[in-house]
Image (spheres, rainbow, N blue to C red):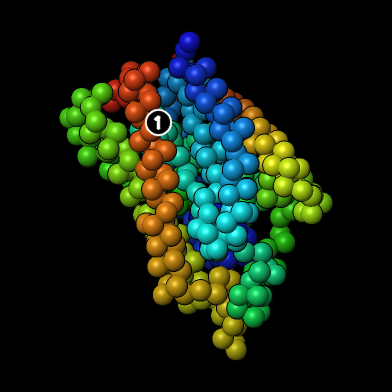
Amino acid sequence: MKIISKLWIFIGVLIALSPLGLLLPEYSKAGSAWGEWGADEMRELIGYIPKGLEKLSSLWSAPIPDYAFKGWGDKSLVSLSLAYISSAIIGILVCAGVVFILGKFISKK
Amino acid sequence: MHIPDGYLGPGTCGLFYLIMLPIWTAASRIVKKTLNARQVPLLGIGAAFSFVIMMFNVPIPGGTTGHAVGGVLVAILLGPWAACIAITVALVIQALLFGDGGITAIGANCFNMAFVFPFAGYYIYRAVSYKAPIKSKRRVIASGIAGYLALNIAAAVTGFMFGIQPLLYKTANGQALYCPYGLNVALPVMLGEHLLIFGWVEAIVTALAIKYLQKHSPELLIEGRRS
């Protein structure tokens, strides 16, 4: 089998395992990454929300925020894992698609 | 390491967009000369790999999380300029579709993870693996060292960006406007967590991938193949 196909299979395995990136932090009670807190978490940390942060943090409303579907905040870990896998598939398809289109312009024939 | 919107002030955000513009331009120009059309699928896999590996949040129990970026591997296989493009694509999609990393911070995040990181990793790998045979153990070790050090260098630069914000932006009564933590906190925390945990994840992922490729597709590791 060509190495490219093998590597895509490997990416598929990573997609299937990706919920580990959601579940391990959940079970080990780890919070957000450092410096990636939401405005409310920031208030808990330092007692106030920096004004500029408050304004900018709601600037962009992503269609699939934090790799979960909108309004799924309270869903079970199983649903969230499925959303995580779906996000990985969508993200990877878009990544590969963009690179293939870019590649038409920025590679030598 | 994905700086969200609101942690960097407008000046810092603007500056790193300005810095990244010529880097992106140079990357497309150089890749156009060096990347074969038949290497594009590998670049696509590189972007996909970087995207998905960043979803593997590794916890520090009771503390924070972090992740590998995967970009040193792409830099070793396709060169740092191509890696810059692949990681940029992954980061822009993460910001736009998934809100992972801010829109205003795309310049800064790309500077850290799509520029500093793959370039540092690439040159460290080249130095440590200098003249080592393609299938040698030294290449595996070199790739691990490159992944570890490069992620820590990128983390330090990210910590520096966070840390200078309270110096740059303050209200009249001394409250922070953006990231409230100064260099004395941001730098040691960012560096410390990557030195202790996340750097090792990057090292292991990179080294295992190189070991696999040595066995199954060593031609991908031949230097100069990309040029």
- Label 1: element kind: helix
Looking at this view, is B59 or B83 the one in front?
A: B59
Position of B164 with respect to A41 (left or right) is: left
Looking at this view, is B227 or B112 the one in front?
A: B112
| Residue at 17% over, 30% down | B131
Chain at tag 1? B
Position of B218 with respect to A4 (left or right) is: left
Position of A9 with respect to A88 (left or right) is: left
Q: What residue occupies the far top of the structure in this picture?
A: A1
Position of B12 with respect to B141 (left or right) is: right
> In the picture, residue A9 is in which quadrant?
top right
| Residue at 37% over, 57% down | B195
Other-residue count near label 1 (Cα within 10 Å), few / some / many at <14 / 14–19 / ≥20: some
Is residue A19 something one can see in this rendering?
A: yes
Residue A32 sits above or below residue B71 on the image: below
Residue B113 sits above or below residue B70 on the image: below
Q: Amino acid at mark 1?
A: Ala
Looking at this view, is B92 or B29 the one in front?
A: B92
> In the picture, residue B10 is in which quadrant?
bottom right
Q: What residue occupies the far front of the structure in this picture?
A: A27
Please name the residue that numbered disc 1 is placed on.
Answer: B209
> In the picture, residue B145 is in which quadrant?
top left
Is residue A33 something one can see in this rendering?
A: no
User: x%, y% of residue A54?
Assistant: 69, 70
